[in-house]
Image (spheres, rainbow, N blue to C red):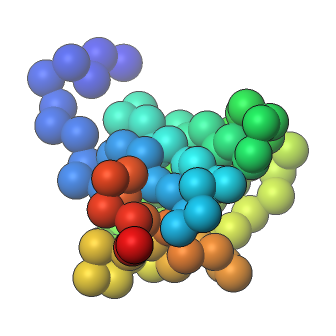
Amino acid sequence: MDDSTSTPHPYVGMWVTADGHIRQELLPEGRYDEARGDRRSAYTGRYTVTGDHIDYVDDTGFTATGDFRDGVLYHEHLVLYREGQEPD
């Protein structure tokens, strides 16, 4: 499948917790890569976005959900901010 002509979803990019411990990258092809502390690619899988809702299925089959509200990603018990927009 050639996605070179499609525009990435506006939520594509790096999302981080306020302390920077968890970094979740939403990739344009519908995959994600989540780092935790020094552990790169701690979780990987695919995601779909419907409106402001996100559904995750990691590569082990585990599922999770989240919602984007006012530029913040509420993912299960995590609160993630677009990289560079973390609160002080």
Compared across the picture, whether 53 is left or right of 77 comes to left
Percent position (x, y) of residue 12? 34, 46
Percent position (x, y) of residue 50? 36, 68
- Rendered position, 82 above or below 87: above
Farthest residue, direction front: 88
- Rendered position, 58 above or below 41: below
Q: Quadrant of residue 46?
A: top right
Quadrant where the image shows the C terminus:
bottom left
Compared across the picture, whether 77 is left or right of 73 comes to right
Compared across the picture, whether 72 is left or right of 16 comes to left
Percent position (x, y) of residue 76? 66, 78
| Relative depth, front residue between 56 and 1 | 56
Q: Quadrant of residue 66?
A: bottom right
Residue 59 visible to an observer of this rendering: no
Identify the residue at image location x=27%, y=82%.
70
| Relative depth, front residue between 50 and 35 | 35
Residue 51 visible to an observer of this rendering: yes
Identify the residue at image location x=56%, y=49%.
24
Quadrant where the image shows the N terminus:
top left
- Rendered position, 12 above or below 3: below
Identify the residue at image location x=36%, y=58%.
82
